[in-house]
Amino acid sequence: MPQTRTLALTRPAPAPRLVLSLLALAGALWAHEARSQEAAPTEAAATAPGEGGTIVSHGYNFFGELKYPEPDFVLDYVNPDAPKGGEIAIAAEGTFDSFNPFTIAGGATAYGAYGVESILTSTADDPTSLYCLICSSMEYPEDLSWVIFTLRPEARFADGSPLTAEDVKFSHDLFMEQGLESYRLAAGGMVSNVEVLDPHRIRFTFADDAPMRDRIGLAGGLSVLSKAWFEETGQRLDEPSDQPLLGSGPYMVENFDFSRRILIGRNPDYWGKNLPINVGRNNFDRIRVEYFADSNVAFEAFKAGEYTFRVENSSLLWATGYNFPALEQGWVFKGELPNGGLPVAQSFVFNLRRETFQDPRVREALGLMFNFEWSNETLFYDLYTRTVGFWNESELMAQGAPSEGEVALLQPLVDEGLLDASILTEEAVVPPVSSPERQADRGNIRQASQLLDEAGWIVGDDGVRRKDGQTLDVVILEDSPTFDRVINPYVENLQRIGVNARLDRVDPAQMTQRRDESDFDMTAWGFQMSLEPSTGLEQWFGSESAAESNRNLMGLQDPAVDRLIAIAVAADTRETMVTAVNALDRVLRAKRFWVPQWYKASYTVAYYDMFEHPETLPPYDLGYLDFWWYNADKAEALRTAGAFQ
């Protein structure tokens, strides 16, 4: 019998189709935004007094206490006795021609820098704290004007060369010289000096006006690269790389075939393998990544045993496709696993650089024509929940009418004419509700048509809307065939109201290039927010980031949004941060630069039944490449039975 079961769910999970950008990694390298958040000193974080009243600690949290207050801790959610060995094979879609994920040049794989580590790290059960990884301790004064990291003398790169303070300074300087502009703007205004004190001690001095919550996270989240490797190879950070970057982590790329396969091996000489924080982790000998042209080909390959672990992102396949022999014979496990993280705010976004989409009435009208309720019932088997805001299912999401604290933040923006006065009294914008009984909701058709009429887009005798002689053209850019069945009904609905709409499906390389060049009308995009948002908000929504499409894909440039981001970044208590983010979420949703899609409240996974995980999974990470392990006896039984090719 097939193994199919549903485990207890916690909080909503990432959206079913996580729209990833490799550049999100580059943008997050200074704070690992979604996982290792900015923090500030608390009494609980201190483990020892430093000179002159400074704090010396192994960990750091801004608003609360550390979950792991003692320096040498083993993670609560791992199996300390997990065996080492075996291989896990996963799939990736599209192609790659570069191993450098820190630039928009080339088509990079996310796995080229898989072994690159940062000074600090976070855990899957304490996402708002930072803990020492490459460092053994950090020292900082109460005013956070600087931080000194003491690096572990045993730290080594994968080639055995020492990782020193000189490498840390080199990495900072390299990102400042050749990194993405959004990173340089953020870090350049926050770090005034980086000084090597000795081979194992490095000091970051912060600008007086640097946001308090971001200081330690910025410095400690720095990806540490090998100075010697970059000098020897002549590699630039702003150019593609045909070789994996040299890192210091537990895994390294062993071999590869461009656009087809990457084999990542566990480094038996990994310097940190005996650190308590790494106990029960990095258990697979090999991680194999197989590349496929599209999701349908990838699924067929999984059924045939060409790879062994799959996180399913298609409701159609989940509901109807898992009836193949390997599952029916009990070789494959299929089930839902809990996820407590923020769901990705998945959506279609408009390219606000296009004159057509600068009128909010047009954006609202087009958003009315996406019928989520019909899609969920007809296409998704009622598996999904509608995305509402950017911080779904959390206290950070705006609810109802603004609170007194929100009004205090919004009123000055209204007084200056940056926001409409309605923002002070109306309930937060939510996606329109449509009838699930028919593809096109008649009420929404009438409302959308009226909005377009008011915007000057008038229906002609041929049924197409025009303004100043130009047709209302909307091309939805997509690279996944899986989305055809979702986008085509949306296109038909748009055509019903006179929009000259069509789907433009391209290959992954074209998709990357056209997004980078902002060459689209609408496209799918996912906003991965954090539980303690700060400077990263500037990359997602700030005006200065509009020139770079790695996060602010829609090209949002709005002074009211910029002001609210600044308030959220400057918040020095959790209460003030929550209020500021509530106000920001409210304003972002009112701008209607997106058409919210959906998310699912769990991970849907299928894998050949030779992998095991701790009985209780942590709330913020499925962790199948981190703390799961390989059961050699089960694997041999599957191999003997013919489960694999």
Image (cartoon, helix red, strand yellow):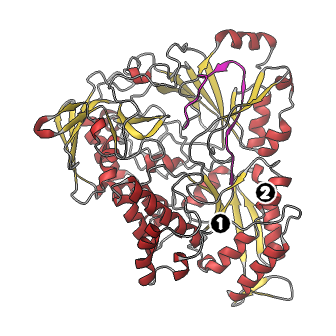
Residue 544 picture quarter: bottom left
Instruction: Name above or below for residue 578 compared with residue 239.
Output: below
Q: Which residue is more in the foreground, 520 or 352?
A: 352
- Name the mark on residue 430: 1
- Name the mark on residue 640: none
Residue 616 part of the magenta segment: yes
Identify the amino acid type marked 2. Val
Residue 377 part of the magenta segment: no
Q: Earlier in the sequence, mark 1 or mark 2?
A: 1
Q: Which residues are magenta?
A: 598-619
Mark 1: give few (<14), some (14-19) or many (20+) Cα within 10 Å.
some
Instruction: Name above or below for residue 610 compared with residue 501.
Output: above
Of all residues, the one furthest to the right in this rendering is: 437
Q: Is 114 on the left-hand or right-hand side of 412?
A: right
- Name the mark on residue 486: 2
Which residue is depicted at the point 70% across and 14% down?
635
Which residue is depicted at the point 78% across and 72% down?
494
Q: Is residue 351 visible?
A: no
Which residue is depicted at the point 82% across and 62% down?
489
Give x and y (percent) for residue 260. 65, 35
